[in-house]
Image: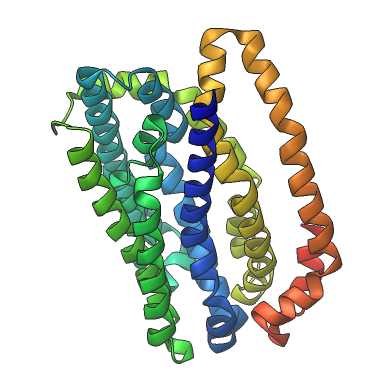
Amino acid sequence: RSNAKKGVLKNVFSLWIVQVSNYVFPFLTVPIVSRIIGPDKLGVINWSAAFMAYFTILINFGFDLSATRAIAAQRDNLAERNRIFNQVVSAKILLFGVSIVLFIGSLFLFPQLRAEKQVAIYSFLLCFAWVITPNWLYQGMQELSRIAVFNLVTKIIFTVVILIVVRQKSDYIWQPLAISIAQIAVGVYSFLFAVKRYKITLGLSKLQPVLDLLWQERIIFFSMVVVNLYTTTNIVLLGFMQNNVQVGYYTAGWRLIMIIQQMIAIPLGQALFPFVGSAFAEDREKGLIVIKQLIPIVTALTGFASILLFLFGEIGIKIIYGDKFLPSVAIFRVL
């Protein structure tokens, strides 16, 4: 039990580092970059990122949950581990191919994407990172700490690159490219390290088993789609109905809140997911007891953070974004 607790704490800390590198370090560029590019170009970048989130959901297909569960159940079975890994990666490659076709169609269909084609393409490159980043494998094996430090160093480097490259308003197009390259670099390293660490024999799965896997996990995928309908879809709809400036105001407040949510909820949830899964595997009632114990903790943390953010929202917006983004304060408090 003592070793299990240490493992949980280690995974929580490692995931916290990953989330810091993924969200906080890029966010450190905002106070400078937002003042350079202004609300309109920030709106362009954030709207494009929100639109590309649809492709990210399609490519991930809920594997961060389902594949993590499958790996956790077969941690010591090399043959099964290989099969699951190759099947999931093959599925992601197939879904990435579908995403490319849909993205090209979207460029012709939506004027908002055509008007900022370069930003759209650079933002779409991020989708490839989700094909090759096997976080679900590390989660299932409960060894996330091995990629945390590298992830942190990489994000620091590319945060510096963004600050160097974005010197004037027209440089806004380079921000999504820098972020995409950073994620791809982390993904390549994570993939190669996983193959070596877990003795994976690479090979593409046949089409039928991949299609069967997608059908089997369709419920989790649809649950991810539903969640997206009340998160990033707001940004996409706003972009269709209003101009880039309004999108910039809205996303300024929304992004700041998302940072807090990511820092508190996701590392804790992802680290505890394998243990919750194990509890349910043993007994349904035991799993429910574990969940009931977790809900008050998450609620207290996010509730306390919400109160602080509401009280100090205006100061936070001024410090982070500057006076040009004062219309974001009311949006921030409502969110």
- Residue at the bottom extreme? 168
- Give the quarter of the image for residue 319: bottom right
Q: How is the image coloured?
A: rainbow
Residue placed most toward the observer, 258 or 105: 258
Q: Residue at x 79, y 77 (%)?
A: 315
Residue visible at 66% across and 9% down in the picture = 285
Does residue 237 appear left or right of residue 11 in this picture? right
| Residue 34 quadrant | bottom right
Q: Tell me the quarter of the image containing the N terminus.
A: top right
Q: Position of residue 106 (x, y in %)?
A: 40, 55
Which image quarter is the C terminus in?
A: bottom right
The residue drawn where x is 77% and y is 40% is 299
Counting from the top left corner in percent of width and height, residue 140 is at 40, 30
State the residue at coordinates (59%, 87%): 35
Left or right: residue 154 compared with residue 197:
right
Q: Is residue 209 left or right of residue 25?
A: left
Quadrant in which residue 9 is drawn:
top right
Give the total number of marks visible in the rendering.
Answer: 0
Can the viewer see residue 327? no
Q: In the displayed structure, would residue 266 be above or below residue 80?
A: below
- Residue 330 % position (x, y): 82, 68
Q: Image height check: is 254 above or below 227?
A: below
Instruction: Describe residue 197's horizontal placement relative to residue 3 as left or right.
Output: left
Residue 151 showing in the rendered view: yes
Q: Which residue is the extreme one toward the front?
A: 2
- Residue 277 on image: x %, y %: 52, 21
